[in-house]
Amino acid sequence: MLPPPQPKPFSIAIVGGGIGGLCLAVALVHHNVRVHVYEAAPAFSEIGAGVGLGPNARAARPGHLGRLRAVPDDEFRVARGAGKVFQFSLRDGEAEQRRSGRGGAASFDKRLVGIEDEGEEGVVLKFSDGTLAIHDAVVGCDGIKSQVRKLLLGEGNKASEPVFSGHYCYRGLVPADKAIEILGEDLATNSQMYLGNHAHVLTTLIEQGKVVNVVGYRTKEDKRWNDSAWVKPTTKEEMLAEFDGWSKPVKSILGLIEKVDMWALFDHLPVATYHRKGKICLLGDSAHASTPHHGAGAGMAVEDALILSKLLASINSAGELESVFSAYDAVRRPRSQRLVASSRKVGDVYNFEDAAIGDNMEAVREYLQHAWEWIWNENLDRQLENAQLLLKMRLKQLRSPEAHSNGVNGGT
Ligand SMILES: Cc1cc2nc3c(=O)[nH]c(=O)nc-3n(C[C@H](O)[C@H](O)[C@H](O)COP(=O)(O)OP(=O)(O)OC[C@H]3O[C@@H](n4cnc5c(N)ncnc54)[C@H](O)[C@@H]3O)c2cc1C
């Protein structure tokens, strides 16, 4: 019998156990990379309603990221073209991490507050409870309010803080049988998008057809969000007042929501790099938080995890981490930052606020029918090949005698 494969001679700290951090952790365990997840929350749990994954993110899963369970959902009609949207759960992926026994582990109640670069010793992570941890590098998967992003960019950098997009939404859940009773099977069970001036409403069947997720988006007139809370409970009356002149199906489905939350929608300004010195790297929302109009933020995090894990799997020393982060940054940053900009544009189109398209329904339809193509039709194999080629070039550069004399390490 073959001896068990040796773990890589470096260890990675993952800060944040959301979809991005967990996908990366599961994939790295699979590739024998020593990894530890530090999560601020007391346990893994579900927050809010499910997220949809497009074909691009589904293509990133099989064989690469553990067994993440996929549940087919209905087609989005006009807005989402002919593509399928899938929901998924991370439970199977977590189970794989536990079973494998290959060194993957997670600690909870660990809120990262600082990172010290200790040169060849690696990085020291500092947590709010006063404890420390040492690893060769840290990948920040800590979401839109990322502390790792702040530490990477510097507190004074405008891009280190999320910015208000000018849009907010009301979210709530409705039992599918109640929705069918009032709207009929067709409207209730097929995803619908209702568009109007400065607002739109999206309904999607989730939880294997048992529940309708209802989201009513609005533009904030003054484009400011002064409240420190981004998610607040609100009343059905307040929400209905904002959709007063809308059609009967919209008012009926909104009226069925019992518990309504209001969400302010923030995103990130573009940054010049996702990494520093082979010690710190960003993934998922910490790198490129976007508004939810493309429904693709989680999918981008899954893609990030695929590319980064494959690159990390192909090196054999901590000295090569900078080359990995540099290649990852080069292939992932343009695509993921395009999502942030494109999602803002889609939100404007939905709310009839796009200067060129306005409320011209033919133009709206034409735009939305193609707006997902670049996201869903991505060739991830080719992207991975490009990243691996870049990594090879960076490593060649790193090993060249000139690199040693000039201190060049192929990074940003
Ligand atoms: C209304 C709405 C609808 C959406 N719908 C979709 C959709 O349909 N499809 C889709 O693909 N995307 C959707 N998204 C986007 C998607 O939810 C995000 O892109 C995705 O969850 C980001 O995952 P992440 O792992 O990068 O970050 P997160 O899920 O935010 O995870 C970050 C983790 O880091 C932890 N953390 C934070 N700070 C620290 C710290 N200092 N130390 C340690 N841990 C820390 C947090 O507790 C959290 O567990 C939607 C977003 C919104 C707001």
Image (tube, rainbow, N blue to C red):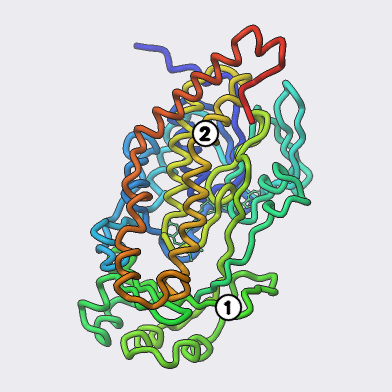
What is the distance, in whole Å, between disc 2 and disc 1 at their CAs? 36 Å
Please tell me whether residue 80 is drawn above or below residue 17 in the rendered image: below
How many neighbours does mark 1 have within 10 angstroms: few (below 14), some (14-19), or many (20 or more)?
some
Q: Quadrant of the N terminus?
A: top left
Is the distance from the Cβ of mark 2 to the nearest ligand 1 atom less than 8 Å? Answer: no
Q: Of the residues shown, which amino acid type is indicated by label 2?
A: Tyr
- In the picture, the disc for residue 220 is 1
The furthest residue to the front: 356
Q: Nearer the viewer, residue 363 or 404?
A: 363
Q: In the image, what residue occupies the spot 37% across and 35% down?
A: 64
Q: Of the residues shown, which amino acid type is indicated by label 1?
A: Lys
How many neighbours does mark 2 have within 10 angstroms: few (below 14), some (14-19), or many (20 or more)?
many
Please tell me whether residue 180 is drawn above or below residue 375 in the rendered image: below
Instruction: Describe the element under mark 1 as helix, strand or loop.
Output: loop
Q: Quadrant of the C terminus?
A: top right
The furthest residue to the top: 401
Q: Earlier in the sequence, mark 2 or mark 1?
A: 1
- In the picture, the disc for residue 185 is none
In this picture, residue 7 sits left or right of residue 363: right
How many numbered circles does the render carry? Answer: 2
The furthest residue to the left: 185
Q: Residue 84's spot in the image, x, y percent?
A: 27, 57
Q: Nearer the viewer, residue 223 or 381?
A: 223
Instruction: Tell me the residue that label 2 is attached to.
Output: 328
Q: In the image, what residue occupies the spot 53% across and 44% down?
A: 21
In this picture, residue 153 sits left or right of residue 106: right
